[in-house]
């Protein structure tokens, strides 16, 4: 069966997939332009493009090549517009292909946040990611993490190994330099020592030769004296061995070799000492060099140790960071760069709606549902409540068949142009829907982002543009939901798609659920004290207009006229016959009265209309509390139920006499108030005469006798009398006897509802009246309670009028200590502000 527009039972709102949005669309909108202001025709690929949304004129393409009905269905080869009716512009949609995914603000910013519940993230953290303030970890490679952690020790760290190698090279260079210097020094010392030995040998040989030469000379010149000093050795080692004038003799020849030998021993000792000094100096210098080497090597080792310890701390810190890294963890820009540099292969992180899309795509709804069910059973308190909330969202997604990733938009639908019209005003100016401005912002930012991506712009610029695109889409869907609302001229908030749907002026409440109807009227309300509970006073002119079709039909059927046209003329001229027919028409035909705001079901009730003069609707005083109505200018709407089912529903369910109890607490909603309470209180009040004996009081055998005496003004309504009631003489008043006549005294209730109501011998205030109405309803149900309430209203109004009670200023009692109270207050004011001595309380 073909589904007609009027043939449906319910309306369901759900997420749309990108494929569904594309299936709705008739083309992509790529330009922000609307119409050409010179030709007044829509711009191609713009927001009013005829190629996408259909022609502006029936059976005519954009360029005018094809006109008239005979070209129906043809797509113009020149302008690409299909020849069809212009009304398709109310139903054809377009789309915008977004350069970067964006989130749907309803699901992110709603209360509660569906996106947040599904991801188990707070809306604040979600907002930081979606609006490019923080990165979020989307995936962790556990194998890579284990491998990194196993290798993340100082022995395996590349930087530590490099530092050790640098240390070893530096120490080796120092060692080689030391060895070279030591070797050179030792060789130099050895060379110098050898030179000293050679010099010693030469000196010894020279001394030996000189000694031999001198011995020979002594022997040759024996007995003579030395002409000069004879020396042995050279330089510093030169020594006078024979002084001038010494006598040459055998003894001198014998002693001379001994002296020379002694001198040689001295020279040898001096040479050995010099060799020893040379070696000691060399050893000291080498030792100093070695000490310097050890110091430098120690410094290098200490530096390596310090650097290694610092790196070990960094390594441990990195291990802790990596070990604690988890999916959905938020990272700042600095943390993201640092983590990527340290362990980029271990994890993946993203930012913006694309990162949230990746997380949503990994959710297994069936598995998540099972986990949350277990959690809701095993845990208690706040965790359980949270698990239940999340489970509701997960189950809703699972049952609807919608994917969680559809909350992230890749394709944005563009609604038909006739739903966001642009109209020309006087003076050549144009008025346009706010949606066109919001769509224009989205398209401009989307096109700019595409250009930046093609140019390879810096990441920070691209991110900022993506954020601006997200904000533009947010404003289009629900302006003002997040951040400051986008405003137009005069600082007026632009109406978004959500604003078109929600609220009293939205599409649902204004157009779909609540429509303007022909069979309704509106007027000021006044009280109708003579009305019965189920009646309302309807002005004659209003009733005639409301029931006009019914009156016209009856005029024809009763033979007053031959056709509807003449019947309509009769009604318009208000012939006398019309009123008679109207009286018959409104019999048994209820009307609905509604007072805005309709906050509960008793805000709309049905009444049988009674024709009244004037222009005001009259309502029964007891239904005022149900409508929360008063008579200071309130207005009410009248609706006429047309079909038999609606009429039956109005009579059986919505009639005011069937709505006696409040749905909220079960107490009577028609309990008497104000003047009625005043009248009944006056009526049931007794001027007590405790000093008067029973026998001295007027006594009546029946209630009727007491009422007759009251009518004949033999007794006052509040005078204490004795009346025989149920076989007993009761001290009461004629007013109470009269009041009891309107109560169902002695009427047997239905079986199982209790005993019949007995004579009420008490003063009735507002609380007592409310209780008696409730008791009456409990015992006897709707019909009798409505009649009793109506009679109480009648009696109450009558005796409120007869009592003539008013309140004046003289009736108000002045407190005895008024002067003292005022004086004390003035003293306190003076203490608070002494600069104001003339302060007076008022």
Image: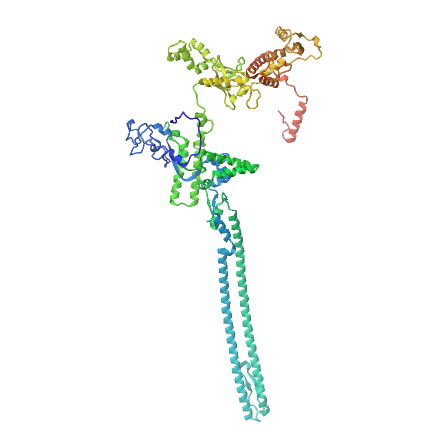
Q: Which quadrant holds residue 23?
A: top left
The answer to whether residue 422 is visible is: no
**The residue positioned farthest toward the top in the image shown:** 712
Q: Which residue is drawn at 56% across and 78% down?
A: 272
The answer to whether residue 676 is visible is: yes
Q: Which quadrant holds residue 775?
A: top right
Vertical order, 81 against 357 (above or below): above
x, y (%) of residue 387? 53, 37
Q: Is residue 713 left or right of residue 414?
A: right
x, y (%) of residue 73? 31, 30
Residue in front for this viewpoint, 388 or 60: 388
x, y (%) of residue 715? 64, 8
**The residue positioned farthest toward the bottom in the image shown:** 223
Q: In which quarter of the image is the C terminus?
A: top right
Q: Which quadrant holds residue 411?
A: top left
Residue in front for this viewpoint, 125 or 392: 392
Vertical order, 825 against 289 (above or below): above
x, y (%) of residue 596? 50, 22
Residue in front for this viewpoint, 7 or 60: 7
Q: Quadrant of the N terminus?
A: top left
Q: Is residue 414 left or right of residue 708?
A: left
Vertical order, 102 against 507 (above or below): below
Q: How many marks?
A: 0
Render colour scheme = rainbow
């Amino acid at each position: 069966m073909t589904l007609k527009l009027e043939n449906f039972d319910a309306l369901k709102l759900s997420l749309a997939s990108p494929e569904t949005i594309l299936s709705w669309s008739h083309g992509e909108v790529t330009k922000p332009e609307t119409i050409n202001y010179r030709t007044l025709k829509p711009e191609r690929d713009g927001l009013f493009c005829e190629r996408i949304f259909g022609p502006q004129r029936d059976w005519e393409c954009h360029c005018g090549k094809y006109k008239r009905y005979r070209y129906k269905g043809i797509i113009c080869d020149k302008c690409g517009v299909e020849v069809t009716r212009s009304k398709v512009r109310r139903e054809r949609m377009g789309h915008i292909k977004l350069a970067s995914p964006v989130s749907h603000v309803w699901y992110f910013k709603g209360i509660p946040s569906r996106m947040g519940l599904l991801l188990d993230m707070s809306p604040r953290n979600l907002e930081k990611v979606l609006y490019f303030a923080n990165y979020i970890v989307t995936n962790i490679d556990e194998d890579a993490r284990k491998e990194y952690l196993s290798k993340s020790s100082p022995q395996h760290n590349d930087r530590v190994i490099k530092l050790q190698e640098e240390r070893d090279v530096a120490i080796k260079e120092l060692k080689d330099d030391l060895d070279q210097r030591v070797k050179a020094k030792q060789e130099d010392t050895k060379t110098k020592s050898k030179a000293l030995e050679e010099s010693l040998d030469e000196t010894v040989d020279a001394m030996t030769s000189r000694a031999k030469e001198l011995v020979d000379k002594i022997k040759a010149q024996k007995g003579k004296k030395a002409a000069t000093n004879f020396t042995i050795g050279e330089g510093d080692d030169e020594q006078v061995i024979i002084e001038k004038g010494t006598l040459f003799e055998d003894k001198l020849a014998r002693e001379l070799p001994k002296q020379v030998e002694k001198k040689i021993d001295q020279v040898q000792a001096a040479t050995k000492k010099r060799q020893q000094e040379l070696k000691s100096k060399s050893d000291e210098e080498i030792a100093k060099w070695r000490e310097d080497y050890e110091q430098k090597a120690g410094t290098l080792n200490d530096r390596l140790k310090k650097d290694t310890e610092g790196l070990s701390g960094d390594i441990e810190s990195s291990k802790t960071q990596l070990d604690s890294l988890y999916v959905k963890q938020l990272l700042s820009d600095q943390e993201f760069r640092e983590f990527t540099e340290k362990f980029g292969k271990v994890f993946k992180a993203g930012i913006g709606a694309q990162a949230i899309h990746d997380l949503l795509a990994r959710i297994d709804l069936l598995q998540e549902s099972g986990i949350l069910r277990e959690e809701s059973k095993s845990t208690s308190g706040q965790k359980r409540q949270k698990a239940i909330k999340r489970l509701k969202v997960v189950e809703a997604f699972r049952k609807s068949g919608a994917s969680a990733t559809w909350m992230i938009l890749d394709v944005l639908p563009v609604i038909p142009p006739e739903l966001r019209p642009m109209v020309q005003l006087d003076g050549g100016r144009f008025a346009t829907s706010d949606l066109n401005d919001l769509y224009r912002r989205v398209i401009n930012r989307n096109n700019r982002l595409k250009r930046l991506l093609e140019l390879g712009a810096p990441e920070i610029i691209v991110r900022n543009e993506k954020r601006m695109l997200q904000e533009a889409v947010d404003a289009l869907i629900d302006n003002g939901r997040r951040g400051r609302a986008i405003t137009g001229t005069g600082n007026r908030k632009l109406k978004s798609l959500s604003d078109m749907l929600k609220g009293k002026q939205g599409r649902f409440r204004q157009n779909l659920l609540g429509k303007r109807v022909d069979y309704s009227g509106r007027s000021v309300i006044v009280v109708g004290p003579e009305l019965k509970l189920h009646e309302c006073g309807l002005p004659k002119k209003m009733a005639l207009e409301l029931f006009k079709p019914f009156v016209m039909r009856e005029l024809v059927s009763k033979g007053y006229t031959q056709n509807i046209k003449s019947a309509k003329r009769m009604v318009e001229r208000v012939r006398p016959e019309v009123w008679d027919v109207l009286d018959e028409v409104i019999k048994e035909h209820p009307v609905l009265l509604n007072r805005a705001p309709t906050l509960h079901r008793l805000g709309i009730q049905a009444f049988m209309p009674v024709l009244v003069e004037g222009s005001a609707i009259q309502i029964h005083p007891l239904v005022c509390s149900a409508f929360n109505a008063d008579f200071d200018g309130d207005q009410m709407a009248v609706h006429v139920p047309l079909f038999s089912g609606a009429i039956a529903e109005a009579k059986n369910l919505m009639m005011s006499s069937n709505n006696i109890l409040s749905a909220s607490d079960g107490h009577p909603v028609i309990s008497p108030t104000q003047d009625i309470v005043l009248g009944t209180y006056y009526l049931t009040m007794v001027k007590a005469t405790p000093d008067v004996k029973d026998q001295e009081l007027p006594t009546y055998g029946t209630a009727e006798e007491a009422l007759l005496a009251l009518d004949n003004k033999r007794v006052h309504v509040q005078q204490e009398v004795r009346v025989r009631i149920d076989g007993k003489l009761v001290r009461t008043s004629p007013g109470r006897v009269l009041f009891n006549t309107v109560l169902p005294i002695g009427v047997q209730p239905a079986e199982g509802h209790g005993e019949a109501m007995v004579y009420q011998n008490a003063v009735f205030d507002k609380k007592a009246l409310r209780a008696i109405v409730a008791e009456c309803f409990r015992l006897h149900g709707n019909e009798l309670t409505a009649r009793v309430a109506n009679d109480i209203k009648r009696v109450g109004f009558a005796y409120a009028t007869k009592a003539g009670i008013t309140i004046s200023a003289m009736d108000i009692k002045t407190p005895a200590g008024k002067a003292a109270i005022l004086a004390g207050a003035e003293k306190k004011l003076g203490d608070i502000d002494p600069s104001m001595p003339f302060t007076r309380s008022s």
